Amino acid sequence: MTIEMQVPALAPTPAGPPLAELRNIYVAFGGVHAVEDVTVDLHAGEVVGLVGGNGAGKSTLIRVLSGAHTADSGEVLINGQRVEIRNPRDAKALGIETIYQTLALADNIDAAGNVFLGRELQSRLGSLDDAAMESATRNVMGRLNPRFRNFKTPVKSLSGGQRQSVAIARAVHFNAKILIMDEPTAALGPAETAQVRELVMQLKAEGIGIFLISHDIHDVYDLSDRISVMLQGKLVGTVRKERVTKDEVLAMIIMGKQPGDVTQSDLEELHG
Amino acid sequence: MTATQKTIPGEAAKAPVWRTVANQFLSRPLIVIFVLSIVVASLISPAFLSTRNVFNLLQQSSIIGIISIGMTFVILAAGIDLSVGSVAALGGMIVAILCQDQWPVALAIVAALAAGALLGLAMGSIVALTSVPSFVITLGGLVAIRGLTLLLTDGRPVFGVPEELKFLGAGFIGPVPVVGIIFILVTIAAAVFLRLTRAGRYLYAVGGNADAARLSGVPVMAVVAMTFVVCSTLAAFGGVLLTAWLEVGQPTASAGAELTAIAAVVLGGTSLFGGKGGVFGTFVAVILLSILSNILNLAGVSPYFQQITTGLVLVGTVLLNWFIARRAAPMA
């Protein structure tokens, strides 16, 4: 069932079992296949860009790993072991953290409350330890966004970049092994985007595996070690970044063409 | 009113005071209206602030207050529970019937509360598991549970209540009505739960953004079901206390209590969209509603006019909250 396309530009699998593997994943919504037989993987200390146009199925695919959706069929493997991820709680227990495109913040709760939402610190009496949560949030924020000040206000009143910082702080505070970033820079200005890129490199250096999801190849090309391209719910292919040009990836995204098959007229069409 | 008159002379010097008063009014209209109504009431009748009248007010507020505290939980999670009046009547009938059957009072109360909890669990589970609005599910509950309550005795009231139960409903400790103490304790317990526990935090998260809460690992369905269990249990408790107070189990009791409770919660500043508010607001609002009817009684106003006033105060306060939220929004 697996689609192993033996194209030269396809990535050779690095040694050892991958940190995470989504194998032959199918997801359907009311008879429409949003994801059809897709297999992708991710190694420790690696950044895999998952790209495709709107509706290509990349977010749906990755939500299977986040626990936000369950697959209709297919397997999820962590360190080579098959796992059941039924909900976001299961995913987090496996060290999988997600920064959603919508950020998934509770607007009426403050930064510390959001960072620890679902994993609150409690005092010995079993009550919420707000002081400890705030101090931990100040620590992690000091690393991510030192200018962040609004620890006491509901996150509703924060700017887009600040809200993004809260979502990132939540993902990195709990020692994630696998980080999923869905369109992490879509709502950010240039300075904040640079900050996120720097953070990605830093986390990668710490050995975290990162799935970077974007509809725009320019967002992820520089950061990615490998790039998986989806089109209409199917995987076009996975390529090592250094073996392809941006144009070749663009041809994969738009035309579903393998890197070796891109012709001069295709390139003209892409840039037309 | 007296405050503004004092600040008008010497505008320049007194401007900050005037502004402080205005800001206070604009940030907490409920408290200001509450204080104003106390001032007006004590001007109309010196008897208003007598110990006896104050505790009288507390007693009148307590049963609907306990029901409203439960309603606050459901509304904070962005739901609504229309069945509380019927559940209260059922709780009141169960305790009356079981006491007549010579059950120990404590056991009869536990049975009534358990019935409430079970009905809350049933309605809450349906709401949590489906995307059918709680309005519809609990509207079904309102009708069906009232029917069930009437069926218990063929619609007849149950007279005779043992002394221990009477004490809960109509008793006093010193000058303080027992139901009032219970109301205050329930409010404090609810506030501690909402403020200091993980489940309380989850309730706000679910009310604020259920999808974000789910993605953060919050067990959203359990939280939603829990709010209905709390609400129905407190409603049944309110019904038990009403039976204890009136010394009769009345199957038609507490009809319309859901509307009064919702009014109190909204008046107390809890958002019908969920995630914002708390039980202290509800506590103050319940007392305020009692004060309003007390004022109008003292002033000898017709009960029909009292209904009009209550409705207008509710709409006026909510409009004021809306205005404040709108004013604050651009700054956020």
Image: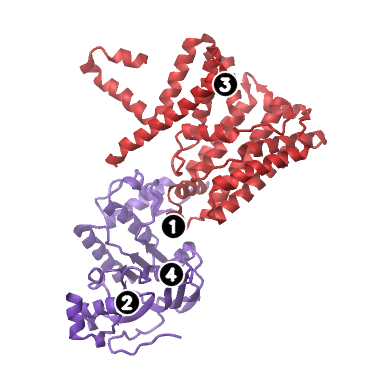
Chain colours: A purple, B red
Residue that badge 4 annotates: A65
Label 3 Cα neighbours within 10 Å, binned few <14 / some 14-19 / many ≥20? many
Asked if marks 4 and 3 fall on the same chain, the answer is no
- Vertical order, A207 against A101 (above or below): below
The secondary structure type at the circle numbered 1 is loop
4 and 3 marks in contact (CB < 8 Å) = no
The CA span between labels 2 and 4 is: 17 Å
Q: Quadrant of residue B301?
A: top right
2 and 4 marks in contact (CB < 8 Å) = no
Residue that badge 2 annotates: A229
The CA span between labels 4 and 3 is: 57 Å
User: Which residue is at 40% across, 61% downward?
Assistant: A174
Depth check, mark 2 against mark 1: the one in front is: 2
4 and 1 marks in contact (CB < 8 Å) = no
Q: Nearer the viewer, residue A11 or B164?
A: A11
The disc at residue B216 is 1
Residue that badge 3 annotates: B57
Q: Quadrant of residue A178?
A: bottom left
Q: Nearer the viewer, residue B82 or B105?
A: B82
Asked if marks 2 and 1 fall on the same chain, the answer is no
- Vertical order, B217 against A218 (above or below): above
User: Which residue is at 44% across, 59% downward?
Assistant: B215
Asked if marks 2 and 4 fall on the same chain, the answer is yes
- Vertical order, A120 against B298 (above or below): below
Q: Position of residue A179 (x, y in %)?
A: 36, 67
Label 1 Cα neighbours within 10 Å, binned few <14 / some 14-19 / many ≥20? many
> What kind of residue is marked 4?
Leu
- Vertical order, B195 against B223 (above or below): above
Label 4 Cα neighbours within 10 Å, binned few <14 / some 14-19 / many ≥20? many
